[in-house]
Amino acid sequence: MGRLASGFAAGVVATVWKTTAAIAGRRQGLTALPAPFPLALVRRLLGGRAPRTVEYPAAAVAHLGYGGTMGALFAALSPRGDGGTARATARGAAWGALLWLVQQLVFFPVVGWGRFGRDLSRAAAAETLFHHLVYGAVLGAVTPAGRGGR
């Protein structure tokens, strides 16, 4: 498997871990978000008029596609074999933090939540930072390019 393909696959795996953490928090009532972010974005882009049977699959495909694409980009930008899994995991967490910053500055305002969730609560920014750190750490740990692989 090539570097981009393995990065994409690692990004999808990391997205599943991130989403699992978000779902677990939501089920425990530990969320400051009115809806899962991918769903809120799809609703905004579709004008809030699509049925759930369209919204939910579209949100899942968009979320996994974005996570995979960012994983491929991470793999393309990662140096090869510079210190093993611990260093790659830390680099992945930094990548996750960068993606979180983009989400907060660009995409949160798009869905009407304001920069850093100011229209919700400060907890929204912290919650999504945690999710992105999970994504990045998993991505770094499982991306072969970042650990000295192809």
Image: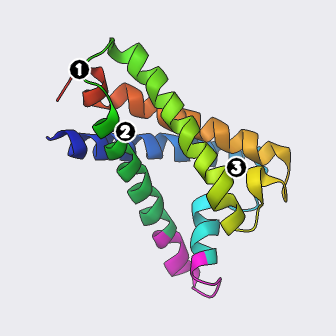
Q: Quadrant of the N terminus?
A: top left
Q: Residue 125 magenta-drawn?
A: no
Q: Residue 52 magenta-drawn?
A: yes
Which residue is disc 2 drawn over? Answer: 74
Ranked by sequence position, the earlier of labels 2 and 1 is 2
Query: Is residue 111 left or right of 75 when viewed as pictured?
Result: right
Camera-nearest residue between 117 and 48: 117
Give the image quarter of residue 88.
Answer: top left
Query: Is residue 140 left or right of 25 when viewed as pictured?
Result: left
Whole-percent x and y of residue 14? 43, 40
Whole-percent x and y of residue 46? 57, 82
Q: CA distance from mark 2 to mark 3?
A: 28 Å
The span picked out in magenta is 45-58
Identity, as a three-letter code, of the amino acid under mark 3: Arg
Camera-nearest residue between 95 and 57: 95
Give the image quarter of residue 111.
Answer: bottom right
Q: Local crowd at mark 2 within 10 Å, few (<14), some, or many (≥20)?
A: many
Q: CA distance from mark 2 to mark 1?
A: 14 Å
- Residue at the farthest top position: 83
**Is the residue 41 above or below the residue 94 in the image?**
below
Give the image quarter of residue 39.
Answer: bottom right
**Is the residue 55 above or below the residue 59 in the image?**
below
Which residue is disc 3 drawn over? Answer: 26
Ranked by sequence position, the earlier of labels 1 and 3 is 3
Secondary structure beneath label 1: loop
- Residue at the farthest bottom position: 49
Residue occupying the point 49% across, 35% down: 95
Identity, as a three-letter code, of the amino acid under mark 1: Gly
Residue 148, numbered label: 1
